[in-house]
Image (cartoon, rainbow, N blue to C red):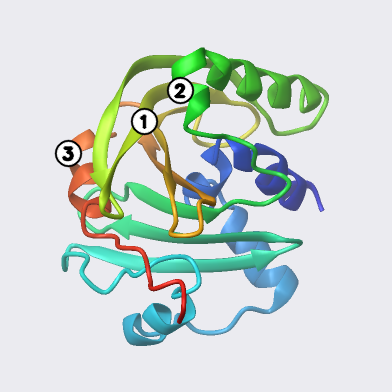
Amino acid sequence: MGCLKFIIKVAIVVLAIVGFKSLGGWDWCVKTFHIGQKPTQQSMLEKTKDVADFSKIRDEYELSKSANILGFRAVVAEHGATGQKLAVVNENKNIKITQEDFKNGQLKKKIDDVNKKLEYQYIHVENFKILKQGTMKTMGQNAPYALFEAEVTNLPVKKLKGMICVAKDKEGKNKIIVSANDGGKYSQIISEQFFKNVKLNDAKK
């Protein structure tokens, strides 16, 4: 259950989500849960409608994972040429990041609090740093984001760099948006090109 704890607890940072496959966690889940063959993109579009509308994303991106484990709901995509991971996560009790946190300085504090809880776990995040803040276009709105870098213990990938963002759906609930890659490979342009084409589904559907 170690990697599941990692995913859920660090979902607030979503480092584990976007790095899950490359860090070896997906192989563990394939063996543990006997997950079958990779689904088609059309079937992924259907499966992920409860999170967002991904039908307009560009061809160089591919929806790779749709997770719904222990109340954790996320969709993960990958940029084919670079391996950069991109994720949208539905708000739940384990994920309490809001747009206000980007304005009042609470974002890093919330992440640091989670990291303290993970201090004695085999896998956890260290030296989380916010590098820059801004806004980007996604889901029909200008949403606040923060660029970050962090170190991950006891995994092949030691350093990650990426972006965390919060948008709101049509019912006012938060959507946690994250992208990350190995430290030197992260591209904010790749993130913005993907997320600007992610739309909100009609709340009535």
Q: Residue at x 50, y 72 (%)?
A: 50
Residue sitting nearer the eye, 127 or 133: 133
Quadrant housing residue 134? top left
Amino acid found under the numbered disc labelled 1: Tyr
Whole-percent x, y for residue 144 in the image: 36, 31
Q: In whole angstroms, how far apart are the C-alphas of marks 3 and 1? A: 13 Å
Query: Which residue, given by chain and number where applicable, does mark 1 sit on?
Result: 145
- Say if mark 2 contacts mark 3, CB within 8 Å: no
Q: Residue at x 52, y 53 (%)?
A: 89
Quadrant housing residue 69? bottom right
Image position of 175 with respect to 9: above or below: below
Query: Which residue, given by chain and number where applicable, does mark 2 sit on?
Result: 102
Q: In whole angstroms, how far apart are the C-alphas of marks 1 and 2? A: 7 Å
Q: In whole angstroms, how far apart are the C-alphas of marks 2 and 3? A: 21 Å
Image position of 75 with respect to 178: above or below: below
Amino acid found under the numbered disc labelled 2: Phe
Q: Quadrant of the C terminus?
A: bottom left
Residue 181 as seen in the image, left or right of residue 16: left
Mark 2, other Cα within 10 Å: few <14 / some 14–19 / many ≥20: some
- Say if mark 1 contacts mark 2, CB within 8 Å: yes
At mark 2, the secondary structure is: helix
Residue sitting nearer the eye, 181 or 143: 143
Mark 1, other Cα within 10 Å: few <14 / some 14–19 / many ≥20: many
Residue 3 as seen in the image, left or right of residue 149: right
**In this rendering, does residue 92 appear at all?**
yes
Residue 6 as seen in the image, left or right of residue 99: right
Amino acid found under the numbered disc labelled 3: Ile
Whole-percent x, y for residue 180 in the image: 39, 39
- Say if mark 3 contacts mark 1, CB within 8 Å: no
Query: Which residue, given by chain and number where applicable, does mark 3 sit on?
Result: 189
